[in-house]
Every structure is written in structure tokens, then in C-alpha cells.
Amino acid sequence: MDPRPVGVFDSGVGGLTVLHECLVTMPHEDFVYVGDAARLPYGPRPLAEIRRFAHEIAGYLEADGVKLVLVACNAATSAALPTLQESLSVPVVGVITPEAHAAVQATRNRRIGLLATKATVEAGRYAELVHTLDAGATLHPVVCPRLVPLIESDDPFGAATTEAVREYAAPVKRAGCDTIILGCTHYPLIRPIFQRVFGRDVTLVFSAEETAREVAETLARKGIDNDPAREGGYRFLTTGDRETFRELGQRFLQLPIQAVERVTLAQLEAAAA
Ligand code: DGL
């Protein structure tokens, strides 16, 4: 039995889609979640900068005593997963591989669309993985710069979001993709909008459930899981405004969030792994 918590991070509230699946799969584990709202969005930033942020947060979580770091952000996974795995002593799990697997398995016409941030598309990890798993499949990536700011805005389900989704969906629809990877952990927060825009014949793939399973298996196989009879807990930290995070987090996670702690950028910078 290992009582240490699992560390989870994202640029904002997107990683809560992954945390939710972790809470469902591992109700006996404790979780500590960091949302880097002060530096959101990550997507338009250069990969080297996102990598630096990821090393700061992961280093902070490791110093805080977590037993595994879950990178619940596609941009940070794209930019930093291998270097985080090299520099941390605890296991590090990311979000891209499970989606690539699921998309290659699901597609019937081998045309896969990818909706993601600029950083994730530019890093090219999905293209590499899809090609490794099925060299005959084609990936049609679309950069969606407006979605993360809209999802984190006061009106995530408003007309501007539906308009943006329609615009970003158009090229992958034209390409005839039957499977779409939602390659950003924020996107499942507006899943009904994607479902209406794409309709029933298109399979939407996102990785939260498979990622949670990978975390659970990693903990079990390494013998660092917690007592299955206990009830786990969760803590939230943000680099931004605590009340904004509490409100948005509670709305999207549909879970009472009592207190959100503040972590400063100076604290993160000092902890870089
Ligand atoms: N949730 C992050 C991701 O999965 C959003 C990145 C951003 O902040 O732009 O990529």
C-alpha cells in the first residue's frame, strides 16, 4: 500500500476531464491537481516554453511527494513527455498514445481527423503514432486556436463556441474522416457540441478513460496503489484566481470543490525538474 497521492496537471480546467475518469476508476486514491491558469493557453506557445512549464509543475508535484505524475494536457504531453520521463524518478503518464491507438482501431476508412492546439499539431506526435500503428492511415490535423479560451470563458456553451467548432470541423468533414481525435483535454468539456456538429456516423475519440486505466495499471503493477477499501480525496492548486478555478472546476467536474490553493509561478520555477 502506498498512501502518496497521484499528481495531475494541465494549463487550466481541461485536465479535469482526465481527473474525472481517474476518480471513477480509482476512487480509493488521493489526487492533487495543478491548473496553470496564469499561463493559459499553452497551445499557441513554442514547444520549448511549454516544456519548461511542464518541468516546473512536474518538479513541484514530485517535491510535494506524489507517486506518479499524470500529464493531463495534450500540448504538455507533446512537448515534454520523454524529457519528463528522463528527469523524474516517479512514473510519468501522458494523454496522446491512448487516443492514437483508439483512433486507429475505430476508423473504417482509415481517414482520421485531429482537432487540437497549435503546439500539439506542430509537435507531430499523433502523426508519428498513427503512422507507426497503421502506415496506411492518413491523419488530417486542424489547429483550433479559439476553443480553449472559449471553453475557459464565461460562456463556454454560447454561439461563438458552436460557430468555432463548425469552422474547425469543416476541413475534416470535407476530407471524409470517419474518426476524429479530440486532441486537447479541454474539448470533452463541450462534447455535446462536437457530437451535434459531427453527427452519429463519426466516432469521436478522446483519451480520458484509457489514460485513467493506464494510471491504475501502472500503480498496480508497480505495487504502489493505495488500499482499495479506503475513500480517496483530492486537492486543487492554481497559479491563477482561486475563485475562478473553483467555479469553473465545480461546473465542469460536477463535484463540490471547497477550497482551491494558490501556487505561485516563483514556487513552480524554483521546483523545475
Ligand atoms: N488542455 C490543454 C491540452 O490538452 C490545453 C492547452 C492550452 O492551454 O492551450 O492541450
Image (tube, rainbow, N blue to C red):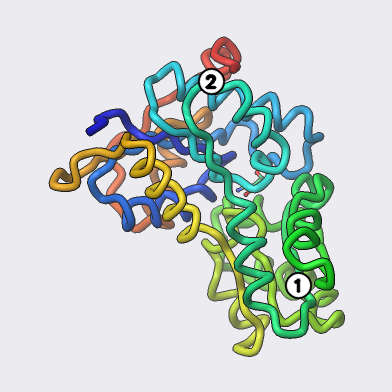
Evaluate whether residue 210 shows in this view: yes
Whichever of labels 1 and 2 marks the residue nearer the N terminus, that label is 2
Q: Residues within 10 Å of mark 2 (few under 14, many from 20)?
A: many
Tell me where residue 203 appears, x and y as whole percent.
Answer: 62, 79
Q: Is mark 2 within 8 Å of ligand 1?
A: no
Q: CA distance from mark 1 to mark 2?
A: 35 Å
Identify the disc placed on residue 59: 2
Q: Which image quarter holds the C terminus?
A: top right
Quarter residue 133 falls in: bottom right
Q: Which residue is mark 1?
A: 112
Looking at the rendered structure, the kind of residue marked 1 is: Ile
Name which residue lies at 28% across and 42% down: 29
- Please name the residue shown 71% across and 70% down the image: 165
Q: How many C-alpha atoms fall within 10 Å of the one at disc 1: few (<14), some, or many (≥20)?
A: many
Residue 248, can we see it?
A: no
Picture layout, residue 131 above or below residue 38 = below
Q: Secondary structure at mark 2?
A: helix
- The residue at the far top in this view is 270
Q: Is residue 56 left or right of residue 255?
A: right
The picture quadrant where one finds residue 262 is: top left
Q: Secondary structure at mark 1?
A: strand
Comparing 270 with 261, the one in front is 270
Where is residue 39? Give x, y as percent.
64, 32
Residue type highlighted by circle 2: Gly
Residue 170 appears left or right of 91? right
